[in-house]
Structure formats: structure tokens, C-alpha cells
Amino acid sequence: MAAHNELNGIPCHGNHWLLTDLLRGEMGFKGFIVSDWMDIERMHSMHHYLPSEEEAFRVSVEAGIDMHMQGDHYYETILEAVRKGRIPERTIDRAVLKI
């Protein structure tokens, strides 16, 4: 589970270096990474790191989050982003293979 906080100014839920390069690459983690309760949305609403929730969803899955824990509209928003080509379907496929 990713942490609530930021590391070097980047929310942990959107930190590719932390989740993919370090955890998976250097440390060899093979499991799946889940978000903490609503923290993907908080990259927009609390951290003010990203301009929208859709962008937060995109950044989180590209950073290495495999499963979003809870959220009112994650499914609809991410599905629409895939339909519009904002998130490649292969990115979602990669995430769900680990669950």
C-alpha cells in the first residue's frame, strides 16, 4: 500500500521512482500495489499536485499503482480515459495482471 505522504514533493501514489524503479526494480517486489483509501484523488484535492482527478488516476497507474482502494467514480473515470486514449489499455492490462 502506498503511503499518504509525499517524497521529495511527489505524492507517493504518483511517484514512479518510488513504486516502480525502487520497489519493483531495485528491491525486486513482485506483488501488487494498492492505493490507500481515496489517496489517488487526494493527489488533486489535497496535495494540489495534479490538475484533475482523471490526471491523478492516469499518473497513479503509470507510476505503479495496480489497484485503487475505494473511490466514488474511479471505474467510470478511468474507463473513459482509456476510451479517449489518455491511458493506454496495455497500462491497465499490466496492472490487473498483478491482482
Image: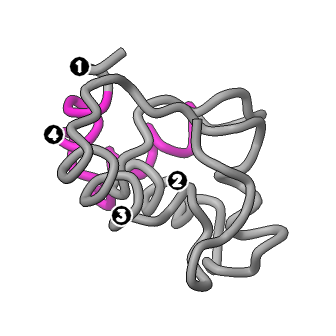
Which residue is under mark 1?
97
First along the sequence among labels 3 and 1: 3
Callout 3 amino acid: His
**Marks 4 and 3: which is nearer the front?**
3
Q: Which one is earlier in the sequence, the residue at label 4 or at label 2?
A: 2
**CA gap, disc 2 and disc 1:** 18 Å
- Residue at the disc numbered 2: 57
Q: How many marks?
A: 4
Judged from the image, the secondary structure of the residue bearing numbered disc 4 is helix
Counting residues from the start of the chain, the first of labels 2 and 1 encountered is 2
Q: CA distance from mark 1 to mark 4?
A: 11 Å
Question: Element under label 2?
Answer: helix
> How many residues crowd around disc 1 within 10 Å: few (fewer than 14), some, or many (20 or more)?
few
What stretch of residues is rendered in magenta?
75-95
Label ID, residue 16: 3
Residue 10 percent across, percent down from the top left: 57, 77
**Residues at marks 2 and 3, CA–CA distance in whole angstroms:** 13 Å
Q: Residue at x 65, y 52 (%)?
A: 40
Q: Position of residue 52 (x, y in %)?
A: 64, 70
What is the spatial separation of the Cα atoms under label 4 and label 2, in whole angstroms? 15 Å
State which quarter of the image contains the N terminus. Answer: top right
Magenta-colored stretch includes residue 83: yes
